[in-house]
Amino acid sequence: MKRPIILLLSLAFGLQGIVCSSPLLHYDSIFNFGDSLSDTGNFLLSGALAFPVIAQLPYGETFFGHATGRCSDGRLVVDFIAEASGLPYLPPYLALGKGKSFQHGVNFAVAGATALDPEFFIQRKLGKVLWTNDSLSTQLGWFKKLKSSICTSKQECDKYFKKSLFLVGEIGGNDYNYPFFVGGSLNQLRAAVPLVVEAITNATSMLIEEGAVELMVPGNLPIGCSAVYLTLLRSQNKADYDQNGCLKAYNAFSKYHNNQLKLALEKLRQKYPHARIMYADYYGAAKRFYHAPQHYGFSAGTKTACCGGGGPYNFNNSARCGHIGSKACSNPSTYANWDGIHLTEAAYRHIALGLVNGPFSRPPLRTSLLGQSIV
Ligand SMILES: *[C@@H]1O[C@H](CO)[C@@H](O)[C@H](O)[C@H]1NC(C)=O
Ligand SMILES: *[C@@H]1O[C@H](CO)[C@@H](O)[C@H](O)[C@H]1NC(C)=O
Ligand SMILES: *[C@@H]1O[C@H](CO)[C@@H](O)[C@H](O)[C@H]1NC(C)=O
């Protein structure tokens, strides 16, 4: 009689086939830093926008049944990692004190956040385009503030954080998105990559110094396959597109960032041999479904947004998802792209699967010291 129960559980957990009755990952808590790819409500709670569309349906329609502040129709990668660890979904930091417990971790990510501080963008006359000033260093400041209520002595903190997973990103994508969308050139932005990577590795170092041992640092997605890039940066020249219909130069840019990040993480591993620093290959995990959409159930395609206001990729800057003139598709799970910028729950699930089960986390999340005892 046991089988049906396990089956039901694994369906409920969403990570079909990888979550059994006991969790795959044995973390006691998760701390997440990042942007809209992992924000579970901070941007909304920050009040940065008076009428944010993510505060209403269709955001959240697939899983939660109501808007949560997540920039998707349902769960994000961080939610699936929490499920695989048998932990509750991470409360947004800005909801703490409103009856939310931080015993099993906290989410510091804010939609629109950058790895570099706002000053970097203000100096380049891009300050006005930022949706939020809650950059990575602000998020780290929140973590330090919270830490004193989690543990006091170094010994106590080390003991607690040894069983925690730290997700440092994805972050950095917006450092490029903002300038690209207002006409920044590939060459200009290539020059900013070392600085963005340094901000990410600085944050990683700081967390290790604070007691983190298990850390996962994701790279950037193949931005050349994203509806917003395909629309705003479209080209008349067929040769600018690869065999999957993605913009070659922008995907190459993501790879350039990712390669620098990987090299920098290798240096960190040498500096902190006691820490387990995992690189999460979001690019590779997502590239799979852009390459073979049908194999992943994306019968409606991977590049056209489910929710939008028209245009060849259903991304219309004058009628974005949630605004007047836009509408959502009837079956989001057949789309990889949710609103032109963000992915659907179905796409995030495939990325999470690739991280938890491999091979898109190096070293794999499942072989972590804390996970070794599980089959
Ligand atoms: C960010 O900070 C700048 C300078 O203090 C301010 O002008 C801007 O309105 C802030 N932006 C947001 C989204 O809060
Ligand atoms: C990284 O940390 C170093 C040393 O503290 C600092 O000099 C540098 O400005 C930081 N870089 C970034 C991009 O924050
Ligand atoms: C984009 O949205 C605007 C405003 O709703 C509309 O006038 C325009 O026709 C839309 N463009 C496309 C290509 O659908």
Image (spheres, helix red, strand yellow):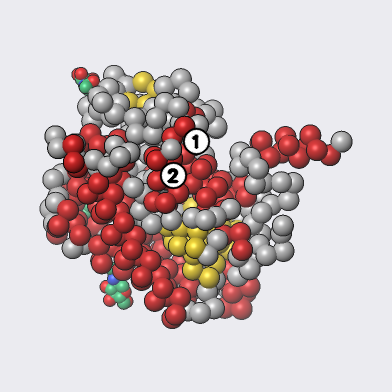
Residue lying farthest right? Answer: 1
Determine the secondary structure under disc 2.
Answer: helix
Indicate the amino acid at tag 2.
Arg
* Residue 179 percent location from the top left of the image: 19, 49
Mark 1 vs 2: CB contact within 8 A: yes
* Residue 148 percent location from the top left of the image: 53, 68
* Residue 277 percent location from the top left of the image: 49, 68
The quarter holding residue 11 reads: top right
Indicate the amino acid at tag 1.
His
Residue in the image at 28% along x and 62% along y: 196
Nearest the camera: 3 or 23?
3
User: Label 1: few (<14), some or many (≥20) within 10 Å?
Assistant: few
Left or right relative to 157: residue 232: left
The quarter holding residue 253 reads: bottom left
Nearest the camera: 179 or 350?
350
Tell me if I can see residue 7 in this picture: yes
**Numbered tag placed on residue 295 in the rendering:** 1
- Measured Cα–Cα span from mark 1 to mark 2: 9 Å
